[in-house]
Amino acid sequence: MDYLRISHLYFLALKKQPNRLASLHLLLLKNWLSRAEDILPAFLMSKKQPICLVAVENNELIASINIKPINKRGTSWSFSLPKCFSEPKWNTPREIKLRLIKASLELEPKSIQNWLIKCPSSYIEELSILRELGFQPQKMIRSWSINLDNKDRVLSYSKAELPNSFRWEKINKDNARLLWKIELAGESVNYREIIDRQSTDLIEKANKFSGVLISKEGTDLNVIAGLIPQDFPEDQTTLKLIRDLVWDSRLTYAIPEILKTICINQNEIIIETNSKDDYVNNILKSIGLEPNIENIILGKSNLRRKNKTAFSSNFKTIEGMLGELNPGNSPLPSPSITPPIKIG
């Protein structure tokens, strides 16, 4: 396992993979910045640059994995599922994936305390690896795509409008704390600890698509819902839709209007929702959107828990979560122990 280097890009150029080559050029630059952060004092650079690790066999690039911080302090990180560029000759694909994920978990600095990953519920091999490495399922999320095929449906939806008392704002220091409270209220205690989020993190990660839906009743300002960028690598146009725990029926009209606003000048956006939020999911269906795939978010913490028994009882196994989706599915395979592998 190694950090992404210029020599690795030369291999992809020979393989004539221009699409992957372009994205890795940017990751290479961020890798250099990340290494600089390791050297320079903390007050000069905060730990927030993504990292790309690669697996190499006989100087041939086999696979890569991307890692990025969830918060500005660098205590919580997320990583992508490993991507394979070519078939390994001396190791199985499972061994490559396992070693890449393990290498990610062993990264410096020691300030990294928590990890998150998003995995499709149908990826049995990847889920088996993650379970073997101690990851616990946190929640199920559903993805909805707005693209060229259905964009006109969103833009022409007749029931889309913002009620008079509502307004859509960009995330700023005045509304970020209210939005932060809503996000945390909708998550389990364990998930809150894993993301270790502060309201300033929402401002830091805000982009041109994210925002806050605010209700003004007299002199009172309340955050009703919001769109925030997802926490995972390669999710640049993926937004998480969050809302207040108490359902507000006016969202039936407000959510379609918000989606119309953000997709006018964008050809593809992915909205992610809690799989159990029937209110929001039914609104997206009524617009004409179709759910893509169901994902499991899994987490792992290096911090010791005071009450391990209570923590364990609050979360379902991966098999249990998958069973809710497809009761007829076979259970996940038992974790296997693989011998040490030398790559490179």
Image (cartoon, rainbow, N blue to C red):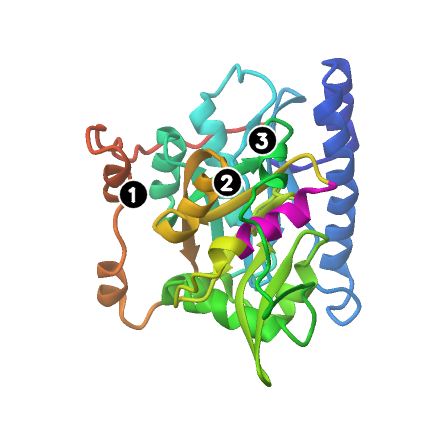
Q: How crowded is mark 2: few (under 14 residues within 10 Å), some or many (20 or more)?
A: many
Spatial CA distance of label 3 from label 2 is: 9 Å
Above or below — where is 62 with respect to 217? above
Magenta region, mostly helix, strand or loop? helix
Report the residue marked by disc 2: 287
The residue at the point 78 percent across, 34 percent down is 25
User: In the rendered picture of this protein, how many numbered marks are placed on residues?
Assistant: 3
Above or below — where is 253 with respect to 245? above
Q: Give the range drawn in magenta.
A: 254-265
The residue at the point 55 percent across, 40 percent down is 80
Image location (x, y in percent) of residue 14: 76, 14
Image location (x, y in percent) of residue 108: 60, 55
Marks 3, 1: nearer the viewer: 3
The reply to whether dot 2 and dot 1 touch (C-beta < 8 Å) is no
* N-term mark: 3 or 1: 3
Amino acid identity at mark 3: Asn
135 falls in the magenta region: no
* N-term mark: 2 or 1: 2
Report the residue marked by disc 3: 150
* Residue occupying the far front of the picture: 158
* N-term mark: 3 or 2: 3
Spatial CA distance of label 2 from label 1 is: 31 Å
The quarter of the rendered structure image containing the N terminus is: top right
Asked whether residue 198 is in view, the answer is no
Mark 3, secondary structure of its residue: loop
Above or below — where is 94 with respect to 194? above
Amino acid identity at mark 2: Ile
Report the residue marked by disc 1: 318
